[in-house]
Amino acid sequence: MTTQASGPAGSRDGDVLLRVENLVKHFPVRSSTLIQRGARDFVHAVDGVSLEVRKGETLGLVGETGCGKSTLARCVARLYDITSGRIEFDGTDITRLSTGKMRPLRRQIQMIFQDPYGSLNPRRRVGSIIGDPFAIHHTASGAERKRRVQHLMELVGLNPEHYNRFPAEFSGGQRQRIGVARALAFTPKLIICDEPVSALDVSIQAQIINLLADLQRELGLTFIFIAHDLSVVRHVSDRVAVMYLGKITEQAPVEQMWAHPRHPYTDALLSAVPVPDPASLDRRERIILVGDVPSPINPPSGCRFHPRCPKAQQRCVDEVPDFIPRLGDEATHLTACHFPVMDGEDISQARPAISADLRVVESSIPEGSLTGISGGEAS
Amino acid sequence: MALLQVEDLHVSFRTDDGIVQAVRGVSFDIDPGQTLGIVGESGSGKSVSTQTIMGLTRGARVSGRAIFEGRDLLKMKPEELQQVRGVKIGMIFQDPLSSLHPFYKVGWQIVEMIRLHEQVTKEVARRRAIDLLKLVGIPQADRRVDDYPHQFSGGMRQRAMIAMAMALNPALLIADEPTTALDVTVQAQVLQVINRLQREFGTAVILITHDLGVIADVADEVVVMYGGMVMEQADRMTTFGAYHHPYTEGLLQSLPAYGGERARLRPIPGQPPSPINVPPGCPFAARCPYVMDRCRVEMPPLAQAGTELEHRSACWLPHDRAAREGLRRKVIGQSLSVSAEA
């Protein structure tokens, strides 16, 4: 997809399609303890995210399950009302727009979802599913609608003659094409792709990725691309933002991110990806993180990654790190970390310098001492 | 001697639409301590093969042999198979929730499993359950042993599954997409656990996955399946570096390159074949860029390719490397050796 060199700050401003400022989304949950009944806890799904998406670019959004990437996307599409913050789309503040005022803008922000099975009504014909946007926005009906739907089907590589078929008659990849066709109905400006290829086999996945790239070039689309598969994200994105527990921890142009990951979390994520190249896997130092992502109901203090971070120090517990360029990086490469990873630094052997009760500690058994445990014959 | 030797396995199911030929003549074997990776897309028959070996495909028509420690698993009575399944052959699946009972504590389930097959007291079994949970890296295992499955995160449930599968120290562990539902960081943890168990206990592992990256990471031998058949079999270096079969080539080229340029991806065109009314010839023929007339009528045997004795490919293309390479340049316009980077 297009790689855009960022121009001088002044001229760049006009290119911004989406600007998110300090976006917060909390979901209330009922407290589980009896004593505090009535008191409210909150899931801090997105907790102060700021980012920009420029026209024609693809912003990749990555992070583990529960990091808030899908919530962020749904907030941007105004599928959720946000708790606080500001969203500006194409120069308009859409943060508090009413449903009626939002409607014309909805044509310009579309979503493609992961599950091509779950997002299509199995009882409706494909032509009618793809034609929905025209019906909802009262823009085309009858023969005109059919003509436009068939044009869309052709655009995404479906046979227009299959207009009257049901979703079940299509394969997984073709169903995802139906989802893409539906999103393209009004030639939107921004398409949010939430794990669009995760459910597909690799050979089909590649077909859909190429399709999205072609459409972006032909129609000048802007993408927010959410995926947990980092090699896919690297392939499609111009810039990448890494999220952890509701916050963006690092953001950079894609090549920068892969060449100089600054945040220990980014470094760990990238090193954990098994690449289909045995030789490079054998050479690589793996950073294996301890434990799981903590609960977003009571996120950790300071840097939220500190309980799992191999480089954590007391300062990380006390102080939220600023999201700024680190170690002389360019202005486009931002990292929220007090102790960023230096070029060539190997953190796979690093040990945190904070007390054990602040860390996620994995119980372990030293190598070689296992034989007594599980011996079926021994007992 | 091979620990498990599968020969000419056929599995078919009768359905309303016709007979589904899920597995059509699959053979492979695995040595003690070895990791065999079986890779393939949905519907390739990779899971059905191992499920059949374990007697988990009810109502299927099965033929062939699966010799484990000298006995044919496919001919065993259900009660005999029960003495093998879970005891000598452990299993883990993609979705740990489907294998952990939601009503019972995790520790209790492991204890029951141990006590069903061994004469030990509850206390001994419980201590072992705790040790097993520690072994797979569950934090505070002595406390969490009394948790219910829903109190575990996805990664912890998968670890608990591994702990249960390893409880009786099986000689073979069958892992069917064990990390597919997990994040990469947790996936790395789980693969590390499996790898460690293997090193310390000499367990053989059959790892079934669609993820070529995972295969490249942990498999010693790789079996590539398509349309219910083995397309290619080789050690991992050969599979990724000097593959022969066009399907293996297609799979690897579909992946976004991890290094190098962000070139356009090269998907395999078309869709996988239907397992009903299978046409004669090679199942990959309809999508293969090298297809010849012969491929559509006659299925090539799985025969030695290249110079490695253990490298076998089911393809009519010349098995001699230079000739294969020449064809590739002609059809794809690019040589084999640079394909990994392109």
Image: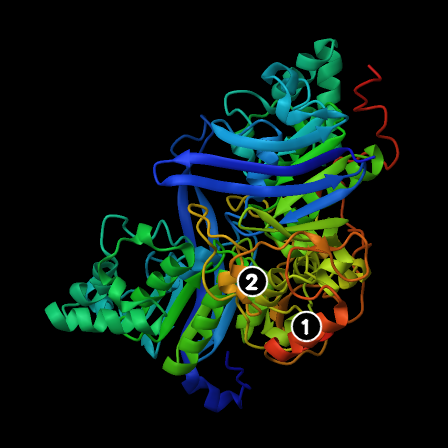
Label 2 amino acid? Arg
- Residue A154, quarter of picture: bottom left
- Secondary structure of the residue carrying numbered label 2: helix
Q: Is residue B4 left or right of residue B280?
A: right
A107, A22: nearer the viewer: A107
Q: In the displayed structure, would residue B341 be above or below residue B201? A: below
Q: Position of residue A310 (x, y in %)?
A: 75, 53
Name which residue type carries label 1: Ser
Q: Chain of mark 2?
A: B
Distance between the Cα atoms at labels 1 and 2?
A: 27 Å
Q: Is residue A248 left or right of residue A159?
A: right
- On residue B294, the disc is 2
Element at label 1: loop
Residue extending farthest right: A368
Is residue B109 in view from this perspective? Answer: yes
In depth, the one of B124 and B332 nearer the eye is B332
Whether callout 1 and callout 2 share a subunit is answered: yes
- Classify A303 as above or below B193: below
Q: Chain of mark 1?
A: B
Q: Residue at x 32, y 58 (%)?
A: A79
Q: Position of residue A64 (x, y in %)?
A: 57, 53
In the rendered image, the residue lying farthest to the left is A142
Q: Return the residue nearer the eye: A273 or B198.
A: B198
Q: Nearer the viewer, residue A257 or A276?
A: A276
Which residue is the site of mark 1? B339
B76 relative to B291, above or below: above
